[in-house]
Amino acid sequence: MEFIFCKWVFVFLLSAWLIISIASSVEGLSGSSKVRGVNLGGWLVVEGWIKPSLFDEMPNRDMLDGTEVQFRSVTSKKYMSAENGGGMKITVDRDAPSSWETFRLWRVSSSEFQLRTFQGKFMTCNVGDGNVSATASTPSSTETFYIERNERNRVHIKHKISGTYLQASTLNEITADYQGIPGWDDNVATFEMTIVSNVIHGDYQLANGLGHDKAKKVLMKHRNSFITMEDFKFLSKHGINTVRIPVGWWIAFDPNPPAPFIGGTLKALDNAFLWARAYDIKCIIDLHAAPGSQNGMEHSASRDGTTGWPMYISQTLYVIDFLASRYATHPALLGIELLNEPSAATVPLDALVSYYKQGYQTVRKHSSTAYVIICQRIGNADPLELYEANIGPSNLVLDLHYYNLFDNYFVNKTAAQNIQFIFKNRQPQLQALNNSNGPLVFIGEWVNEWNATNSTQLDYQDFGRAQLQVYDSASFGWAYWTLRNAELHWDLEWNIRNNYLQLSYSQKTVSFRSVLWLGLACSLSL
């Protein structure tokens, strides 16, 4: 049965290759063309994995905002715990750690921290009796502690206001009443600290960790050098006609955004529009980081991995209005993306649809032709949920992000299986969406990288060809993630210069080779 299915798919694609099709075009682009774009990721919204050197001068760089830590008493061998995620006294009575024993850091300085539970409660101290609990909803000096540590990751935790150290009492409670200064031997005021997770390296972590003046210096240098006019010249030369530019909500408050964010992104975005016009490239402004964070990730500027965006819809609409009013009449503007990658787990569909409808109208106040782009929720969500939402009547685009990564399904998949997935899964979905009476379809992020091991340059070339062929069929087009990246296969310029991704190709040749690839993939799967 599987052989018959593969044979049928192979024959179907071979027949499709023989059919001459007329490609749709996107208004505003030169000629009868669609978006062939690239993301300028890591430029105006910081993502530490894209450029790790931004954090080189960070003191205590493993203790940034959002770092998850656990504390174990060296005397009782028990873990500090906020039972039920807070609301009562802190105990030290757990043999093994879980979510109750895990705290997220809010960094005040390189040695001062506030400790937040997974339920959003902060550790606090009653100065009068030394009781320590997880009962504060918002932090202040009373919820601030010094964390002193040695080279063995043993720590002392001192309350900022009282100046006393936390200790594990004989009643298995944490109290802030240790007398004197503890040593690093096995005593009741010494704990072993385990860093469970330190993965959020975004704008908040950089600016808050370095402090305003140092962060301003680092980011000014970065913004002036990471993307330049020469990059637009390179992109134009290689047939890229659009750039998708991620921005953060604080751009609307430039040059002096709320702390800890650093101004200067608005000037950089203005420069991008000038460079784009000079090389006949169009710009999509992508609200990548919304107030409160729409997905809890570093690229949405989350402080500690939590999502609070649904409470900030009106503030987000203000940002969209600011961007639309500033760039609506600029000849380089192609569209505005209302929100990047809202989380299906934490952003309710009804709240998102309501925002998208309001955002559409906000853009339309300033432009009747600019494309309004809405992004599919990431996680367990069907793109059809937005097709049925009736968000706007014209020039509406749905953004899908296609990665053969970030899912256990792709672990241990071979090169052939990855390519097979593009044809057997991505292509039918695109065809169904293209044929639906709904928004245009945009593959706003994809990359020529996978989990396949021992891949050769030819493997990467074939994977890239397969993706380009299929994503070329998207009615609005595609944009690669990203132009520049410390991870080389994510770096479009590196891929082009080293011939791992071939943008200039013969459609017929590529289609035929891809059909042959699918036939091989099917045979290997039997």
Image (spheres, grey):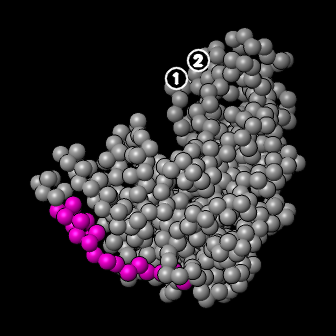
Instruction: Point out which mark residue 95 bears.
Output: 1
Residue 489 percent location from the top left of the image: 53, 47
Asked if residue 48 is positioned above or below residue 6 in the image, the reply reads above
Label 1 neighbour load within 10 Å: few <14, some 14-19, many 20+: few
Q: Could you tell me if the residues under marks 1 and 2 are in contact, i.e. CB atoms within 8 Å?
A: yes
**Tag 2 or tag 1, which sits nearer the N-term?**
2
- Please give left or right for residue 21 compared with residue 326 in the image: left
Label 2 neighbour load within 10 Å: few <14, some 14-19, many 20+: some
What is the quadrant of residue 291 in the picture? bottom right
Residue at image position (68%, 21%) is: 153
Residue 11 part of the magenta segment: yes
User: Taking the image as drawn, is residue 128 in sight?
Assistant: no
Name the residue tied to disc 2: 77
Asked if residue 163 is positioned above or below residue 370 in the image, the reply reads above
Residue 383 percent location from the top left of the image: 41, 68
- Please give left or right for residue 128 compared with residue 462 in the image: right
Range covered by the magenta-colored residues: 8-27
Residue 287 percent location from the top left of the image: 64, 66
- Tell me the SS state at disc 1: loop
- Separation (CA) of disc 1 from disc 2: 7 Å
